[in-house]
Every structure is written in structure tokens, then in C-alpha cells.
Amino acid sequence: MPTVSVKRDLLFQALGRTYTDEEFDELCFEFGLELDEITSEKEIISKEQGNVKAAGASDVVLYKIDVPANRYDLLCLEGLVRGLQVFKERIKAPVYKRVMPDGKIQKLIITEETAKIRPFAVAAVLRNIKFTKDRYDSFIELQERLHQNICRKRALVAIGTHDLDTLSGPFTYTAKRPSDIKFKPLNKTKEYTACELMNIYKTDNHLKHYLHIIENKPLYPVIYDSNGVVLSMPPIINGDHSRITVNTRNIFIECTGTDFTKAKIVLDIIVTMFSEYCENQFTVEAAEVVFPNGKSYTFPELAYRKEMVRADLINKKVGIRETPENLAKLLTRMYLKSEVIGDGNQIEIEIPPTRADIIHACDIVEDAAIAYGYNNIQMTLPKTYTIANQFPLNKLTELLRYDMAAAGFTEALTFALCSQEDIADKLGLDISATKAVHISNPKTAEFQVARTTLLPGLLKTIAANRKMPLPLKLFEISDIVIKDSNTDVGAKNYRHLCAVYYNKNPGFEIIHGLLDRIMQLLDVPPGEDKGGYVIKASEGPAFFPGRCAEIFARGQSVGKLGVLHPDVITKFELTMPCSSLEINIGPFL
Amino acid sequence: WWHVPVVPATQEAEVIEAELRSTKRWELTAEGEEIAREGSHEARVFRSIPPEGLAQSELMRLPSGKVGFSKAMSNKWIRVDKSAADGPRVFRVVDSMEDEVQRRLQLVQGGQAEKLGEKERSELRKRKLLAEVTLKTYWVSKGSAFSTSISKQETELSPEMISSGSWRDRPFKPYNFLAHGVLPDSGHLHPLLKVRSQFRQIFLEMGFTEMPTDNFIESSFWNFDALFQPQQHPARDQHDTFFLRDPAEALQLPMDYVQRVKRTHSQGGYGSQGYKYTWKLDEARKNLLRTHTTSASARALYRLAQKKPFTPVKYFSIDRVFRNETLDATHLAEFHQIEGVVADHGLTLGHLMGILREFFTKLGITQLRFKPAYNPYTEPSMEVFSYHQGLKKWVEVGNSGVFRPEMLLPMGLPENVSVIAWGLSLERPTMIKYGINNIRDLVGHKVNLQMVYDSPLCRLDAEPRPPPTQEAA
């Protein structure tokens, strides 16, 4: 969930009133936001870097507000204020307009070289904007928020904003060999080639995260103006030449990316949020983008879409009984201008360009419910009559757990993920023999594989509890995972029961006795006939030679028991003899 | 019994009673005795100086020389003449003196210590001439069970005593009811799994059927795509999800259904605009460790959709899920998710809230409120908050919502069927309930078995323990 940080006093000034922290928290809750933290720059720096560094920092109160991940229109102060003011019916939602320039329209021409790396671009102009320090900061901050969220860390979309008065169109969006791109980037004093820049930015704490997006491509995307001035090298860095400042009056905005839909949404959000400060409020100057196939489009789209939803559908989905007029009013409070039309039961809802999150009637239903107030909805119990059933494997597991404890064994709860070493090397097995599933992106060795046996988890539990009085008697009934090409995903869970006995003597007879008890509980008689069970001498690398037996029940092998090999005991950092039992309980269902 | 106890045992049936009487008195130390007899060191020094004086070096060699010299000097009985020809010489200043120290010590010796003032006594004590001695004595008398014959108390009843009836006239040693009993040898269930059993019980009481969840490995298709979670969603990032190297891809997917899901994502349909992006089958085939049990719910709902005619269902599951997250005191790479699902005609948000109220009431949580939220696969969505008496604030206890039509309709469920669902983790309420601050104290091989041995029954609707000192959120 993105967090937006705004100055409290600035926020209250824009809202036209003040709130106590509790009141504002309440308002957020109602609207689906969360006042996550009340802090200040000073507090933040002092927390992260200590009091000394924080000495000169501002102690203006900041509100950190959590915004739902799909509400890009609430990612800056301007949007938050507009959303809350409309919600509280203090203002009407502004109408955003795209206008044609008096003079020539700004043109961005996409060349076909971009196709393989970053094929889409959109653009727009904010004309006669008036920044202040706070507005400018918010403008920069919004771009960062968008980059981190909808833009997926610039992979899907990257935004460049430029001082139009320093440039001359038409602009060209192309892709070139990195060695052929040379310009002075933002915050540098001289020109570098793209190759040099990629090297320099490897140590830049902010930019290093974006390098991978183009790093290994033969061509890098780049935007030039008609004089060959570099506007930006998306998605890494803008040129210094066209940098915007608090005094910039005319802004050229370009968004490039691999997802056309998201690029259009991002452009719409930026211009709707900041056209507030244009001389002609909420108007945006169009720009023309010519695609490699020669087709040309005008942006921003700023599309208003009409949806029709029946009032009784909203009532039925929420569980309320409001008149169509009231519902239209509720929706209008959510920035969705609505009116009752037709037979008096239809509501026509206008979806503004800021609400890209509304893609289905159910999104409209939710907004009606939010405006009505979730906590005002009458709670009722559904009349759904059903008979409960347990999943048979879990039912058997539950029954067995209680009787394992009654037999004197204590239940452990260990991890399903572990290292290769745990299931292979430490048990004297080769990893290929385990048929384990392997994780491709573990952050540490603890998460290399899914366990193929419960034994390592229990032995590690004992190792962590060596100070406890002996004997230690542990069990676990849980799932292990084995590769299996007969299933749709290529792997299958098996429900295993594992028990270990750890003492000064191996206690094979105790583990053997536990097996007898388990078979008694499962109503499996001893002997090979009539689906009974037997144990037969066997061997396994985890067991002491001559002290291992395979368990056969209901005509199939279900597991093994025996005295653990001293090497296994040592590798799990244990010192005492230990016997164990592990069976698959699936066949006993 | 003629072993006299130092401190009489008061609880046993008394043969004798012994009462402690202690007295304090003053006694001379060995040095004090010497002074009472021979005079103080300063007096002895005074007496040893002849009228013509004595060389200081010679005086210092006397047994009382060192201590006596300085005391006699401060009493102004003697003086030192440093100008004498053969070194400093000591002369008497007065003709005679009173040896007050000796007199006082003799008083004490004569049992008249009370004649001395507190100050005088303490001065003598500081000079280690006098000591205060506490004398403990016991006043012994016949007890309630006084007897001149000796009989041993029996500790336990024996079969022989029962058969012979001898227990009737035997005295028995009383039990110490303050001592602890001997804990039974027993096995123990794990506290988190005890809580799991209770949650299963609650769902079963409410008529919910358990879904199969015995597949930790899932395809991206069932884990994400089927839930209308777009392929560029952050949750599908390597940083959040464990993907598999082997088996890397799901071998089979229900292709008819996959086509409908693909169309809904990329173009929309079923009344939806869709996400308008290029949906890739390769991405859907990628295997992973399921990030939520909702993938199992999706499979269950898909199976339900294939059964005609539709019959309403209530489903639940509790099982492990996996996240490739940064680990901290409250986050592990795997945890248990609890999920409830109801599918029926005409279900409303009010129904969802009603069923949540019943569910949480069974957990002993009665104060609920609901906050609008965003989940990719539910709309409307609501986070469930409950007021925590201990923490004195609202804490999030679950997440819930109505499954999106874009998820349900491609499965083939009828259009007027709504599916409401909610989920929570098993660990978090357990930690809050039992005041555990670090999840590693509850789950995994590093757990202290003593905690498992000592854990009480899980009674979710019973009064919670006092709140933790530190917030477990």
C-alpha cells in the first residue's frame, strides 16, 4: 500500500478547516485511507540517522497516509484534498479539459527502433503553471509515487517532465547504441555517454534500481528535441538542459513505457492533479504523438466514460434500501458524477479520467457502499443452509494428533521450506535422489527446497532444545512435497507422520512400540495378510546398519523406522542416540 | 527426638513446645579484659615515663607505645621535646591522671554496663574493647502431643495398614500442601495447532465444509490469474513470491477456462473493462509456492461451477502459505492462512459483515468495525478491525470482500451468485491472544519445548491473558 506524506498544516489549509488527529484519523478510516503515522522531517531523520544529523531539519508536522494501491488519484496532496472535499460535499468535482494550443501543437515522433525495448510514449503540456516551493515538491513527489507503484519501479512506465521554454519541438523518441548517446544528465556538470552514465549510476542509491531495465539491451531509449538536445534517457534519467524549477511556467510531460494503458493513466493522473495550478485551471494542452506506423494520436486522453447501473443492483449487492436519487448522490460524493435517468431506477455514472480503478459495476457498488458508510450497513446472516464436512485427510490428522500426544509424544511445528543440506547431505542422500522441488529465488539457504521428509525439522527442534530433560519424544503430522509429473503442477503433497525418540539409549523398542500403537489406532492388524502391517529389515543411509526396517501396510510400503546413523546425529549437532519413524498416512484414509 | 531443632518445626504435632527468648548484653573483648586488668595503653605509657623523661624512640618500643603515645598526647598528659640532644624526648605534663577507660571497662566487667552512656559504650566498641552479644535461648515446655514414649510418624498409608487396620492408631506425618505436585509424564500438542483445531471447530459449528489445501505448489494461473490479479501486479514480483526452478512450469491448465481468463484480463468482458495488457500464458504457467490459500478456494469454486445446477456452499480452509518477504519479529517466510468462503444467490455486504460478526464472536471478539480497502480480487473489500482492550486501540484482525465478477464468471458460476470471503492469519491472533512478541517463539524448530509443555488449553472465547507489555502488531 503506497504511503503519501503531506504537511498537516498545508493539508488543513487546503481543506479549509482543521481537525484533531483523532478526527482526521476517523475521516481517513471512513474514506478507506489510513493515517499511518504523525511525524516530522526532524523526527524521521533523527530516527534513521540520529539526533545530530536531525538538528537543522524541519519540525513541520507531517501526516503519513496509506492510500489503497489502485487509487493513483490520491497519491499527492492535491488529489487527497480534492477527493476528501468532494466526499464531504464541500466542492464539486472539477471537469478536466484537453485544449488545442493557440499556436502549433507539440509533436513527439516515435521511431521504430523503440519497438524492441520500450515501444510506447504519450505526452502533454501544462501551460502557464504557477509553482510554489510546496507545489513543486508535490509535483516531484507524485512522479516518484507513480514510479514506485503503477509504473512498477519504472519498468512499465517512466515519466519525464521538462521546461518547455528551453526546448524546441518536434521531439523524437528513438533508441540508439549507448555509446552514441551523449548528454549532460540532471545534477551533473558535464556530458557523459550512456555507457559512462550506467557505470556512474551503479553506485547511485536511487538510480541503481532502474539500470537493469535497459542495461543489457543493444539500444537505449532516448528523446531529443529538434536541435538534438536530450530531454531524457528513459527510464533512467532526464537531461539537465530542460530541468524544471519552481519558476518553470510551461511543462512538457512525456511518459514512455512497455504498457500503453498504464502510460496513458499515468499521464492523465499527472495532468489532472497539477492543471489545478495552470492559468486556465484544469485545462491541459494537447500533444500529438506519431507512432512508427505513421498513425498519430492526441494526448492526454482525459476520457470520461459513462456507465449505467440499476439502483436495485447496488442496493442488492450492498444490502441496503436507498432511493436511486440517494444512491446517485452517494456516488457523486465519491468523485463519480451520477444522475438518475430512464425509468427512474437507472443511474448514469460518469467515470472521470482520474478513476482508472473503476473497471466494473462492482467498483461502483463499492463506492456507493463507502459513501453510505460500511459501518452503517445492517448486518444480517445469510440463509445459506449447508452441512459441514471435514477434509478426510485433515480429519484423520486431527484424530491422530491427539492420540500421539496421549502416547507421550510432544507435537513440533517445523518449517516446510529448508535447505538442500537438511534433506540430502545431512541424511546421507544425494539431492537428486530426494525428488525435491527447488525454489528459484531463495533469499537465503533456509528456503532452497520444500522438505521431502519431516525428520530434519524434528532433529533441528531437538538440537535447539538440548538442555531439556531426556528423553525427548517428538512428533509432527504435516505435509512434505515430492515432484510428480502426474499432477497438473508437477508436484504433490504427502501427509507424513514422523516421530523421534532421543535419549542415552536408542530406544528402538519405543519407536517400534509407537508404530504398533499407531497401527492399533488405525485398526491395521499385525501380519502380512488381510491388509495388515509388517516391518522388514531394510537399509537407508540415514540409519545405523542393521537397525532399519521398512514398514509395509495394506500391501504397500508406507515408510521406515530405525536407529539413526551416528553421522546423521552428528550432522544435526546432536550427541545422543536417536530412533525415528516416518510414515505416509495417506494410505490409511 | 532429642535432637533439639534450632528453629522449632511449628506445623508438626508438638511433642514439646520451644519458645525462642533472646537477650543482649555487653562483654569485654580480649583486649578490653587486658585493659580492665592492666590499665589503658595511654595510662601505661604515662606511668612508664620517669620524671627526667624518656627518649621517644625507646617509648615507641614499649608494648603499648604506639597507641598509648597518641592517646596520651591527645589527652595532654605528655609532651615531646624535639630539641633534646639525643633525639626527641617525652616528658610528663601532669603529675597524675585518671584512667577513665579502665574504670569504664571495669564497670562493664562488673555487670554495670547500663551505667555507661550510649556514647561512651559506642566509643569503647569502636576501639574494639567492648562487644554486644546476643544470646538465644529456648524455653522448652510440654507440647499438645507430649509423650514420654517415642513413636515414629507414618508418611503414607500402605496396603498392610489397610488390611491390618493399623492405620487407626498410627500418627501420620502431615502433608505440605504448599509444595508442587509431580507433573504427569505426557505428550503435548503444539499451541498454534491447538488454536488451529479451535478455528476448524468454529467453522464446523457454523456449517462450513473444509476445502482440500494439500498442494503447497501452485501455478501462477491458480494463484494469481484466476483471481484476476494482473500479470504485472507487484505480488507477482520475485521479491514477494517464491517461484520454482524445478518443476518450473505447470504441465496442465484447464485451457478453455484459461482462454476466458486471458480474455478478461486483456480485453475485459462480463461487464468489465479488463486491464488491457498483453496476457501471457508463459507467465501463468510459472510454478510457485502458493502465496495464499485463495488459490485453493479458486480451485474449489471452479469445481463448484462445473456442477450443474449450482448449489450454495460454505467453505473454509486453514493451511500454510509462503511469502518471499523480509523476515522480522512478526513475519516469517511461511505462515498459516485461515479462509472462509460463502457462495450463494444474492449475498450482500451486510451478509458478509453479519457472518464476520458471528465468526469473531466465537473468537471472543465482539467490538468490530469495517474499513474500505483494496484487494485485487475482491470488490467491495473491507478490512476488519477489532478494539483491543489491552492495547487500547483498533487493530486489524482480518481482510474480507466480495469476489469480483471477473474472477467468478469466467469459472462458469451463474451471474446472480455472489461469493463472499474473508481471511486472516493463524499466527497473528494467536500472538495477540497469548502476548507473544516474536513469532519465532511460537513457530519453527527454534521454539522452546518448555513453552509447548506449559501451554494451556486453547479457549478462544475465554478471557484473554493480561496484555503484552510490548505490542505484538
Image (cartoon, coloured by chain):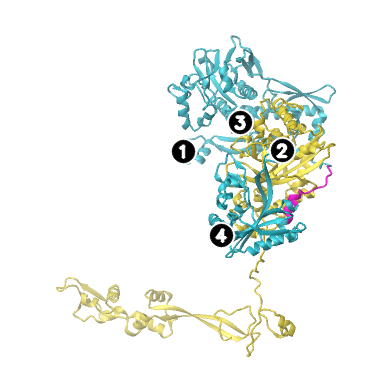
Let me know if residue A562 is in the magenta part: no
Q: Up-down: is B19 above or below A334? A: below
Helix, strand or loop under label 3: loop
Which residue corresponds to the image point at 74% horizontal and 53% vertical from the top-left? A588
Calculate the distance from the C-alpha at mark 1 to the C-alpha at mark 3.
30 Å
Residue tagged 1: A53
Report the residue marked by disc 2: B382
Could you tell me the amino acid type at mark 2? Met
The answer to whether residue B343 is left or right of residue A111 is right
State the CA–CA distance, disc 4 to disc 3: 48 Å
Name the residue nearer the viewer: A479 or B33. A479
Question: Which mark is drawn over residue A466?
Answer: 4
On screen, residue A472 above or below A31? below
Crowding near pointer 3: few (<14 within 10 Å), some, many (20+)? many
Q: Residue A397 magenta-drawn?
A: yes
Q: Is residue B59 visible?
A: yes
Q: Is residue B314 above or below residue B112?
A: above
Which chain can be seen in cyan?
A
In the picture as drawn, the residue positioned furthest to the left comes out as B85
User: Where does the image place residue A246, in percent across and percent down from the top left?
Assistant: 52, 22
The crowd level at tag 1 (other Cα within 10 Å; few <14, some 14-19, many 20+) is few
The tag on residue A149 is: 3
| Pick the front one: A215 or B352 | A215
The answer to whether residue B450 of the structure is visible from this angle is no
Identify the magenta region.
A384-399
